[in-house]
Amino acid sequence: MSKYCETCGMIHDVIIKEEERTYKVKDIEITENLYITYCNVCQNEVYNKEMELKNDIIMFNAYKKAKNLLTSEEIKKLKEELEWVNQFMTKY
Ligand SMILES: [Zn+2]
């Protein structure tokens, strides 16, 4: 695969590496393995639209997952509080 490298100022062969990156998506910090494209000549990061799209999907899915976990945790907490209140109510 060849991409335009801004550092070299020309189209060069690129290599794609899977790397762990942390991004802030809205209110959550997400760490995921993303596809990072590097110029095979200068080893600098190169913009790669296809991989950016792929990374966006990975981040979006991770965000949804994180949000769901958060919600189910909140529900659990709420249930526990409600049970505690119910116990309190029957006793007195
Ligand atoms: Zn380069």
Image: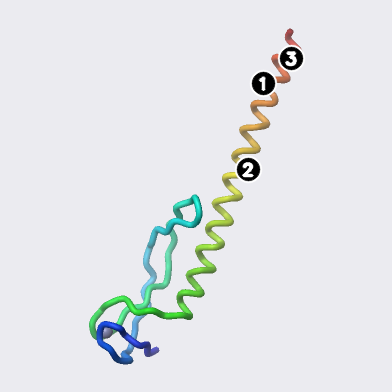
Locate residue 67, reporting x and y percent.
Answer: 58, 50
Picture colour scheme: rainbow
Provide the secondary structure element on which disc 2 rests.
Answer: helix
Disc 3 residue type? Met
Q: How crowded is the residue under tag 2: few (<14 C-alpha within 10 Å), some, or many (20+)?
A: few
Distance in Å between CA atoms under marks 1 and 3: 9 Å
Q: Which quarter shows the N terminus? A: bottom left
Q: Is residue 65 above or below residue 36?
A: above
* Quadrant of picture, ligand 1: bottom left
Locate residue 19, reporting x and y percent.
Answer: 37, 67
If you read the primary sequence from the N terminus, does the residue marked by circle 1 or circle 2 appear first? 2
Residue contact at pointers 1 and 2, CB within 8 angstroms: no
Residue contact at pointers 2 and 3, CB within 8 angstroms: no
Which residue was labeled with disc 1? 84
Q: How crowded is the residue under tag 1: few (<14 C-alpha within 10 Å), some, or many (20+)?
A: few
Distance in Å between CA atoms under marks 2 and 3: 26 Å
Furthest residue in direction top, as rendered? 92
If you read the primary sequence from the N terminus, does the residue marked by circle 2 or circle 3 appear first? 2
Q: How crowded is the residue under tag 3: few (<14 C-alpha within 10 Å), some, or many (20+)?
A: few
Q: Say which residue appears at 48% left-offset and 80% top-offset.
A: 50
Which residue was labeled with disc 3? 89
Whether the residue under disc 2 has CB within 8 Å of ligand 1: no
Distance in Å between CA atoms under marks 1 and 2: 18 Å
Give the left or right position of residue 25, taking residue 89 as reference. left
Is 84 or 53 nearer to us in this picture? 53
If you read the primary sequence from the N terminus, does the residue marked by circle 1 or circle 3 appear first? 1
Circle number at residue 68: none
Which residue was labeled with disc 2? 72
Q: Is residue 78 above or below residue 57?
A: above
Give the left or right position of residue 73, taking residue 25 as reference. right
Disc 1 residue type? Trp
Q: Say which residue appears at 49% left-offset and 57% top-offset.
A: 25
